[in-house]
Amino acid sequence: MHPLHRGRGFATEAVRGLSAWVFATTELRRIELRANLDNGPSLRVAEKAGYTYEGVLRAAELEDDGPHDLVVFGLLRGAVGAPHVFPHEELVTPRLLLRRFTPDDVPDLTATAADELTQLRTGLPRDYTEGHGRAYALLISEQHRLSGGGITWAVVERETGRFVASVDLKGTEWGHRATEVGYMTAPWARGKGYAGEAVLGIARWLFGRHGFQRLQLRAAVSNLASQRVAEKAGFVREGVARNGAGNEDLVIFSLVPSDLP
């Protein structure tokens, strides 16, 4: 795209038009589109043009700064409607802004993931480095979104812009409009109610904008702090999944639209 015309939807319109022309004038049954996994604008063009995420070719494109992963999208003749993928949208709560991760978030994300308490409560790599954080923030989370499985937000204070948490949706069942939320709070932000505020903001977005009917949250029986987050956000305790995470039991909470104030 010419620099002066970016962000106006021209590429999406052109891809849609060309795709329609191909199917109308040829006997081709499939069109493939590839884009760098770290090229957000190109990925959005593919999504908006109705292409379906199919997978990632690792280190398939060699550029001046090294190898890049390529996302493969496909469009089939007769395909109707766009695939189920959460759009990137910024969410605002009284104290917080939920947005996409940026490279500037990587050091704080890494410090949070490598923190002793976080390590105790999660299955994250025990030697968590900035390499892990960068891969998750800039590549893995986007791959997860494109697959339709969920979406991840970096949570920052509106007043200071400081990173305070990571919140993600996972295991999304589009047919039932149900998904699960997980979160990781930075050590310097614990005890302030940020996780619950962020989760509640996401719930309102899910139910009001996307018609979801259930948001699930699981917390280890021994993780009382995480259970308090669920309770303060209005989740209802449903039961316990035995050995739900390795050898530890998990408390199951849920939130449905009628639970919101």
Image (tube, rainbow, N blue to C red):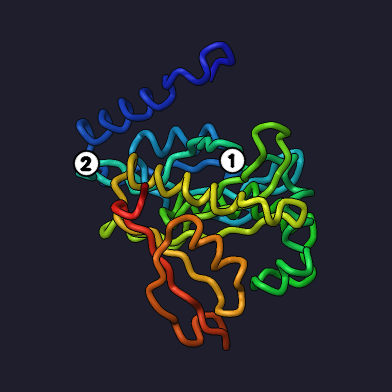
Q: Which residue is mark 1?
A: 100
Report the residue at 52% width, 83% height from top: 249
Front-lying residue, 193 or 132: 193
The image quarter containing residue 180 is bottom left
Residue 75 is situated, as x and y percent measured from the top left of the image, at 32, 44
Give the class, few, some or many, for how many residues have Cα within 10 Å of label 1's Cα (few <14, many ≥20). Answer: some
Q: Earlier in the sequence, mark 2 or mark 1?
A: 2
Say above or below: 130 vs 208: below
Q: For this view, does 247 lie left or right of residue 135?
A: left
Q: For this view, does 252 lie left or right of residue 190?
A: left
Q: What is the secondary structure assignment of the residue under circle 1?
A: loop
Task: In the rendered structure, find residue 240 and report the number of the disc placed on it.
Answer: none
Say above or below: 165 vs 19: below
Residue 226 is situated, as x and y percent measured from the top left of the image, at 58, 66
Residue 215 is situated, as x and y percent measured from the top left of the image, at 39, 59
Query: Disc count in the image?
Result: 2
Front-lying residue, 148 or 165: 165
Q: What is the secondary structure assignment of the residue under circle 2?
A: loop
Give the class, few, some or many, for how many residues have Cα within 10 Å of label 2's Cα (few <14, many ≥20). Answer: few
Report the residue at 54% width, 48% height from top: 197
Q: For this view, does 94 lie left or right of residue 214?
A: right
Q: For this view, does 231 lie left or right of residue 131?
A: left
Front-lying residue, 104 or 245: 245
Report the residue at 60% width, 39% height from top: 96
| Amino acid marked by disc 1 | Arg
Residue 116 is situated, as x and y percent measured from the top left of the image, at 78, 69
Report the residue at 43% width, 68% height from top: 253
Residues under labels 2 and 1: Cα distance? 40 Å
